[in-house]
Amino acid sequence: MVQAIVAIAVVAFLVVLAFRTIRIIPQAKAGIVERLGRYSRTLNPGMTVLVPFVDRLKPLIDLREQVVSFPPQPVITADNLVVQIDTVLYFTVTQPRSATYEVANPLQAIEQITVTTLRNVIGSLSLEDALTSRDHINAQLRGVLDEATGKWGIRVNRVELKSIDPPGTIQEAMEKQMRAERDRRAAILNAEGVKQSQILTAEGQKQAAVLTAEGEKQAAILRAEGQAQAIATVFDAIHAGKPDRELLSYQYLQMLPALAQGDANKVFVIPSEFSDAFRALGNALESRARAEGEPPRVLEGEPARALEGEPPPALEGEPRRPVEGDVTPSPAPAGGNSRRHE
């Protein structure tokens, strides 16, 4: 019975001894070995052998890039506004020994130096510059943090400002300012559009007016040429037909109603040639009547003279109608309508 207990104790001791002697370090991890309380060596990934009860392995250190998000920190800007800034830090442990022995709590140390550096950088900027200069702030923070954490065996890869939250009243004022600026830009763009539209409309109307005038000009020219050709044709036809005086007088009388047309014609002036045309037409009608054997037409109130062949008395200011046997002299040089009867 005693031998069995001793054997079990020996086996347990050997298992514990083997467990404390052989250690396996995972990938992307590093281990610090202390021998008799002093730093001995840094263990890389893989299997290693320790001296039992002499060497002690400290907690493994992660060599991968790590991300730390810090809570919002109040920061005062250059224009005395308190803003809440959230930061995100990306770092990597490059020297496990320094990260173990140079700083007691690396994350807390990084957080505090990040807050102090952020206050120094934001304190020299206004709120508007802080909102629009994030890349500049990130570069300054990274430079300061990388220099401070270099002796700790930590390399700061990036520092990002996750959010910058101004007070609620400032946010409302900024929104109003942004809305007013957008309204102003919209009004300017609308005015520019109206201006361009009016300019294009005016240019179109100008071109249309020019083209209309050109069209009217060409139409007037063609119309005048057509009228000239028509007049020439009529003139040639008249001269080719050799009209007598009676036809011309009849055409002249037909044109008199056209001369009297129009609302503005209050006074109708009869030309001096009207009596000559009327007299020639009357003589032509009487000659035709005599040739056909019809009695001459008698004016009302003068039956005796018409039957006897005497001409009716002439109206006041009108020359007497010639009858058969009268001699018609040539017209007077002064150009009147009176005739001399012999």
Image (cartoon, grey):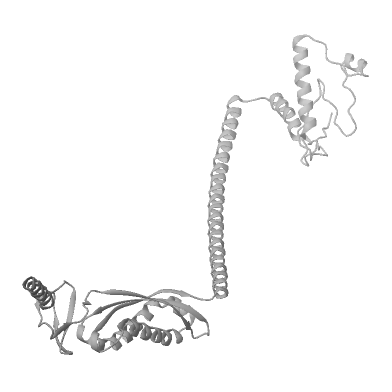
Q: Let me know if residue 95 appears in the view.
A: no
Residue 218 shown left or right of residue 95 in the figure: right
Q: Is 291 in front, or is 97?
A: 97
Asked if one can make out residue 249 in the rendered structure from this viewpoint, the answer is yes
Expressed as whole percent of the image width and height from the top left, the position of residue 266 reads: 83, 39
Q: Position of residue 8 (x, y in %)?
A: 10, 71
The residue closer to the viewer here, 94 or 11, is 11
Q: Splitting the image into 4 quarters, where does residue 49 fall? A: bottom left
Q: How many marks?
A: 0
Image position of 287 (left or right of 230)? right
Position of the C terminus by quadrant: top right
Report which quarter residue 43 is drawn in.
bottom left
Picture coordinates of residue 265, whole percent (x, y): 79, 39
Instruction: Say which residue appears at 72% left-offset and 30% top-offset.
Output: 255
Residue positioned most to the top: 293
Q: Determine whether 278 is above or below 100 in the image.
A: above
Q: Nearer the viewer, residue 304 or 205?
A: 205
**Does 256 appear above or below 192?**
above
Residue visible at 75% across and 12% down in the picture: 291
Answer with left or right where residue 188 lies relative to residue 248.
left
Image quadrant assignment for residue 314: top right
Q: Quadrant of the N terminus?
A: bottom left
Residue 145 percent coordinates (x, y): 32, 85
Q: In front here: 131 or 190?
A: 131
